[in-house]
Image (cartoon, rainbow, N blue to C red):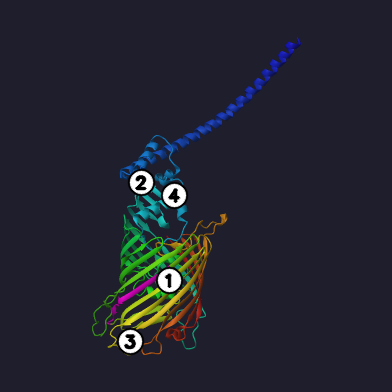
Amino acid sequence: MIRRSAASLLLGSSALWGACSLQSAHAASASDAAQIQALQREMLEMRREMSGQINVLRQRLARAEVHAPNTTAANAAQARRVAAANGQPLPESYARDIHIGGDTGTGSNFGSVMQKADLGTPPSDRGVSSSWASFRAATEKEEALHLGGMMVGFPGGRPTISSDDGMYAMSIGLAFHEDIGGFMGMSPRRGEARGDFSSLAENARRLRIPISFRYKNWIANITPDFGNGTGDGASTLYEANLNYAGFHNTVITAGYFQPRVTEEDSESSNEFEMMERPAITDIVRNIAAGDARMSLGALHYAKRWWIAGYVTGQSYGSRGGSPEKVTGVNSYTGIADSQSGATFRVAGRPYMSKDIDVHVGLSGITAFKVAENGGSRSYTFSEGPEVNLTTTKFLSTTVGNVGSIWSAGPELGFRWKRLVLKGEYYHIGVTRGDNYGASAANRGSVNFQGYYGAANYTLFGKARSYNIKEGAFAAPGVDHAFDPAHGYWGALELSARYSVADLDSALGTPGGIRGGQQTVWSAGVNWYPNRHFRFMLDFNHIIVSRNSALYDLYGRDGNSVAGRIQAAF
């Protein structure tokens, strides 16, 4: 009896537990079924997306196979095509190479392209002159959006449309520099002119639109400039040239161009430490180079050295007037015989490491035949006070009876981690033409000189580095675009410079030249929120020699404060 009761109790308990378990299991099954259905829907959506991506891969592999040569790389592409067709997984590196999803024109790929274009150093203010291979490598590095058989990307930070293989391409850029500032303490003595030294002025310094057209290694560049001048802009041409870049690390150029001479002149204006070049650099480069100079020559670069040479002629727009005598006037109004000249520069890095770059170089320039203008051969040397907010130039002199002009000098540079030091010295010589028939004031050679020393330190961001394609130091880089919420502030650098330009020669003699001597102490700060924008602030203390005629006419030693807004694409 007891056994039956115990057995009945056990069976009843078991039945009750089983019924409870069954109800619980039924509830759990209902919940699991809902989750399973949700997962199935998600997997179905993923399958659809993957099917679309596989179709894109097959199409692009088929196109690549048509153009690919019979090489190891082509065989590898064939193997990847077979793997994709069989549903086998592709390596992540291959997926990145072909930009999965790019052909659709939607998704996050374009955002990735734009984000990468934000980082790095500022684009150049010039047209593109890289080789076809370098152009394709830059496109892959920066990523590109594929639209059918075309690519849209930002190689080097410049908007570019090209064919899938990079054979045909067109790039359009921007170099936008607007300056605002003024002068202090430039008051003249009683009875003398004050000169153009406003307390507040502005200037459209550069408004360039570089446009480049490519077919393989042939590149045509044309860059109009709507801001070239000291009077708040003047529409002109910066460059219009044809380039061939098919030889290794070599660019051959013909047309209106800026031949590279001196370290400062080799840098893009988007990379300058200060708002303007040192006065002596501008004086030297304008002898037979400068902007929009008719040129024929080439440059070659390697990891440790850089060399360039050009034969040059007149600058764009300098042949105005008539080479014939004006009726009733015993003078000419235009160039009767154009200038001929040449430039040469060689630079190298005898020592380089992760933290150190040592730069040495030598630049030379000559106008071996000065243009005949107005019936004579003369040349005017002139330069402003290293801030482009005035039309008054303390340094100015015209040398007559010129046979030829030459200039040469060394350049030195040193980088240690975030610190860059550099300097250049140049001697200018002027030989006279018909010394026997000329007056005493136009006989004998003339000699000028100038130099500068500069220091730069990057407080945050990627420090200045060495640009082997320019043989010069590049601007700081931006590792993270401006984003204060996440502690990113771009890049910030401090600069200082001491500059002297002396256009006095043989004072006190019959053939003496009094062009003035100018000394400028400069300090500046540059902030890059990203690679495309920069804000500059410069202070200059200007000292002009007392024996300059222009000093006695146009004011005193003084100061300037100026800022610049820069956009570069």
Give the alpha-carbon distance from disc 3 to disc 4, as whole Å.
66 Å
Mark 2 highlights which residue? 148
- The quadrant in which residue 554 appears is bottom left
Q: Earlier in the sequence, mark 2 or mark 4?
A: 4
Toward the viewer: 468 or 561?
A: 468
Q: Which residues are magenta?
A: 360-375
Q: CA distance from mark 3 to mark 2?
A: 68 Å
Q: Is residue 519 above or below residue 474?
A: below
Name the residue beneath numbered marker 4.
110
Residue type, label 1: Glu
Q: Please, which residue is most extreme toward the right here?
A: 2
Q: Amino acid type of disc 4?
A: Phe
Q: Is residue 292 above or below residue 190?
A: above
Instruction: Give coordinates of residue 527: x percent, y percent.
Output: 51, 64
**Marks 1/4: CA–CA distance:** 43 Å
Label 1 SS: strand
* Residue at screen point 37% across, 57% down: 171
Q: CB atoms at circles 2 and 4 under 8 Å apart?
A: no
